[in-house]
Image (cartoon, grey):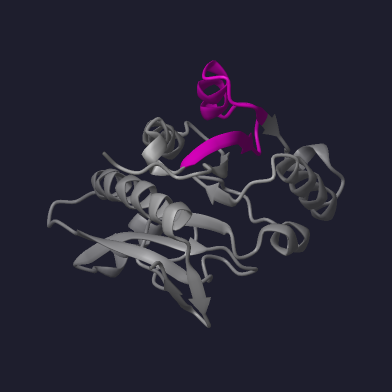
């Protein structure tokens, strides 16, 4: 029998859309041996379908939309305050399409992770698979990394390679990357909460 952790780590998941990565995390968390529970789900838009999925499962949700604030600084403060209420051990950006600000990073830096659909440092930004195809690479993939003040520039936690096929379109490559990305996210978050991690300069180690 797998030994269960003495305390489940508290995960806060941030989303912008359907929440497919969230669903995978919740499925993993259903096993206490995974070592974590999703204590809240936040979004930057109330139309994010993943919010309803979380609410149906009794998970608290909140929305902080940039358009509801006069400045990005006010939005950043509101997002930080809303997130801090749930005292998360780890914050997971699972398709969250907004860059957080300095207040959020001051509160959660070093424990805020993001999954990106390219092999960083190549192809940062929101069009990773498209940019990879246009460049003509033979291998694409996904990267799990800590978030810093840059755009997809934080220390890399893990990467998974996905071959680019001769007949790939942006849609077909994106879908295969998503599948690998979800598996990597669930596996690595589980290892992080159960075993911890260290960051030495840019080198991330999970024991």
- The outermost residue toward the bottom is 201
- Position above or below: 153 against 70: below
Residue at figure coordinates x 73%, y 59% from the top left: 107
- Position above or below: 148 against 46: below
**Residue 51's x, y, as percent?**
57, 26
Viewer-closest of 130 and 198: 198
Quadrant for residue 132, please give it. Answer: bottom left
Bounds of the magenta segment: 36-61
155 left or right of 133 in image: right
Task: Tally the marks.
Answer: 0
Residue at figure coordinates x 64%, y 46% from the top left: 88
Residue 127, can we see it?
no
153 left or right of 184 in image: right
**Residue 95's x, y, as percent?**
50, 45
- Position above or below: 9 against 150: above
**Residue 108's x, y, as percent?**
67, 58
Quadrant for residue 99, please give it. Answer: bottom right
Could you tell me which quadrant the C terminus lies in?
Answer: bottom left
Residue 89, can we see it?
yes
Could you tell me which quadrant the N terminus lies in?
Answer: top left
Q: Is residue 59 magenta?
A: yes
Quadrant for residue 73, please give it. Answer: bottom right
Viewer-closest of 18 and 170: 18
Q: Is residue 65 magenta?
A: no
């Amino acid at each position: 029998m797998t030994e269960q952790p003495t305390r489940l780590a508290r995960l806060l998941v941030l989303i912008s859309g359907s929440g497919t990565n969230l669903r995978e995390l919740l499925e993993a968390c259903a096993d206490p041996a995974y070592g974590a529970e999703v204590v809240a789900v936040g979004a930057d838009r109330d139309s994010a379908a993943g919010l309803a999925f979380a609410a149906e499962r009794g998970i608290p949700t909140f929305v902080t939309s940039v358009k509801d604030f006069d400045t990005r600084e006010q939005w950043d403060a509101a997002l930080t305050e809303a997130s801090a209420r749930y005292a998360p051990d780890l914050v997971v950006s699972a398709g969250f399409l907004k860059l957080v600000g300095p207040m959020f990073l001051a509160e959660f830096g070093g424990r805020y992770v993001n999954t990106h659909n390219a092999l960083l440092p190549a192809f940062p930004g929101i069009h990773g698979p498209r940019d990879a195809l246009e460049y003509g690479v033979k291998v694409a993939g996904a990267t799990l990394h800590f978030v810093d003040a840059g755009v997809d520039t934080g220390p890399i936690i893990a990467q998974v390679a996905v071959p680019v096929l001769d007949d790939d379109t942006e849609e077909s490559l994106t879908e295969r990357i998503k599948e690998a990305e979800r598996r990597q996210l669930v596996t690595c978050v589980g290892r992080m909460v159960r075993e911890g991690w260290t960051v030495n300069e840019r080198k991330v180690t999970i024991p």
